[in-house]
Amino acid sequence: MSTLAKVMSKFRLAVVQLQVSSVKADNLSRVRRLVKEAAGGGGQVVLLPECFNSPYGTSFFSSYAEKIPGESTQVLSEAAKENKVYLVGGSIPEEDGGKLYNSCTVFGPDGEMILKHRKIHLFDIDVPGKIRFQESETLSPGNSLSMFETPFCKVGVGICYDIRFAELAQIYSRKGCQLLVYPGAFNMTTGPAHWELLQRGRALDNQVYVATASPARDESASYVAWGHSTVVNPWGEVVSKAGPEEAIIYADIDLQYLSDIRQQIPITAQRRDDLYAVTSTQEGSG
């Protein structure tokens, strides 16, 4: 392997677990500061949490919603360019054509937006006595898969509840993604039960790296996030994890290690395409 190839086979991922407040301007200023800190720590790809500019909740989405491009995405663009990083901008409530979406934008080191992913699967759950939440009361679902290229690897994007749908991760993996990123905000019921389990499952099933970014926990919020942003390797091991508080975690993504895992347990070659298949019917960056 050439020296350049060895260098490009590894890169540092930084995951920002942001403390989100009800003041949008404060959230955006924290993003600027923490992205700079993440880049200073060697982060070449930086991941922000779901709903980073707004409290999470159906009562907040319409009042905090923005057009894209808009105020929050302008901050992301500038932060990516100033720090020369690939910035996966968590998500924000997006208004477009009278509809609201939960949308993730990705910016390159030149500050240009290279992707917009709208949450495909809306978080509508009802666990009696614990939590009921219906995103569909205010949000509309996205209808496209979302992947982007970096000099290191191809990356697949989902938002929070999207991680529960194994087919999405399978398609991303089959289309060449080696890292899957999920900005998310699991809660105090589903977080301890399923957050890490789902990430390890998606990583192990598809022999990819999986990274999640949660808001930091705020016990006084109407929706209390679990926190514990995490990075899992293709062997299904947790390689980096935050606690509940605001933090930046780092993980060195080793694509040669990923390749080695796939050679040792060659599930891709052993898949019975003559018996079953998972396929996509629509792609894009909407």
Image (cartoon, helix red, strand yellow):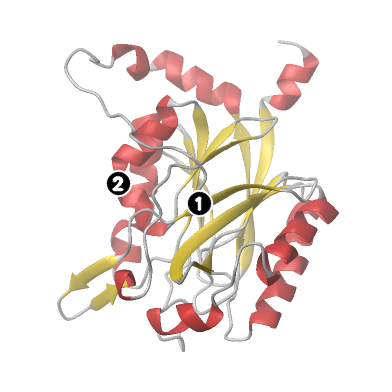
Residue, x 30% and y 57% (percent of image)?
194
Q: Position of residue 66 (x, y in %)?
A: 58, 72
Mark 1 surroundings: few (<14), some (14-19) or many (≥20) residues within 10 A: many
Q: Position of residue 71 (x, y in %)?
A: 70, 71
Contact between marks 1 and 2 (CB within 8 A): the answer is no
Residue, x 64% and y 81% (percent of image)?
24
On the image, which quarter does residue 127 sit in?
bottom left
- SS type, badge 2: loop
Along the viewing direction, whichever of 240 and 229 lies nearer the viewer:
229
Q: Is residue 181 above or below residue 18?
A: above
* Horizontal side of residue 251 vs 204, given as left or right: right
- SS type, badge 1: strand
Q: CA distance from mark 1 to mark 2?
A: 16 Å
Asked if residue 78 shows in the view, the reply is: yes
Q: Which residue is mark 2?
A: 165
Residue, x 50% and y 51% (percent of image)?
117
Residue positioned most to the right: 82
Q: Which residue is mark 1?
A: 117
Q: Is residue 248 above or below residue 81?
A: below
Q: Position of residue 88 (x, y in %)?
A: 61, 52
* Residue type, label 2: Phe
Asked if residue 228 shows in the view, the reply is: no
